[in-house]
Image: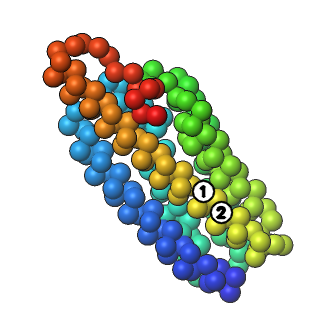
Amino acid sequence: MQVLTQWDSFYVIVGTAAGGLIGLQFVVLTLLAERPPLRFAEAGAAFSTPTIVHFGVVLFLSALLHAPWERIDVVAALWGVTGLGGLVYTLIVAWRMRNQAAYEAVLEDWAFHAALPLVAYATLALSSFAAAAYAHDVLFAVGGATLLLLFVGIHNAWDSVFFQISVGAERRRRGATGKDESPSPANDHK
């Protein structure tokens, strides 16, 4: 399908970036596993796992839209289902963010872990309905949603790593001074 082949380079670049970033996330999480902070699993389900999911969706969309489809309606249905699944998952993430006690989420966290992913996944879901009639324009919406998920993932990965480094530095500081104060994650990471 000619309209999709024009996007080949875009999805090769975006998919490669997502795949590389997934690998880096695994390396970072492996390094952090040696000294996990308090309630790490609870916070991870709200903050770290969604980052891998978003990168995974970008990788999936890159493969999906790079395949040699003959009709756009089939691929549109697949990215639409992906968008619906992402919407549901993002609502679960928002619930987890609200209910976890390891870290008090601030406005930036709500924007990058809930609001922006909702926009991206809603764009995927809704654009699938217009794909047959407006294929050229809809592919820009899908590309924008894919890039948004990639940038959200990059931001969230950086934020997560910075937070973990801050918590580790606070632990080392407390260990050096002998104080038994609890770190304040909400203030340390921003």
> Where 82 sits versus 162, above or below?
below
Residue at position x 35%, y 51% from top?
25
- Assign a secondary structure to mark 1: helix
What amino acid is labelled 1 in the image?
A: Leu
Where is mark 2, residue-wise? 144
- Assign a secondary structure to mark 2: helix
Q: Position of residue 27 (x, y in %)?
A: 28, 52
The reply to whether discs 2 and 1 touch (Cβ–Cβ < 8 Å) is yes
Q: Position of residue 171 (x, y in %)?
A: 24, 26
Q: Position of residue 129 (x, y in %)?
A: 79, 62
Residue at position x 57%, y 37% from top?
108
Depth check: give the residue in front, 171 or 58. Answer: 171
Residue at position x 26%, y 32% from top?
169
Is residue 70 visible in the rendered structure shown here?
A: no
Mark 1 nearby-residue class (10 Å; few <14, some 14–19, many ≥20) = some
Residue at position x 75%, y 68% from top?
138
Quadrant of the rendered structure where residue 72 is?
A: bottom right
Q: CA distance from mark 2 to mark 1?
A: 6 Å
How many marks do you count on the picture? 2
Disc number placed over residue 148 in the picture, else none? 1
Left or right: 187, with 142 as reference point: left
Specify the farthest residue to the front.
177
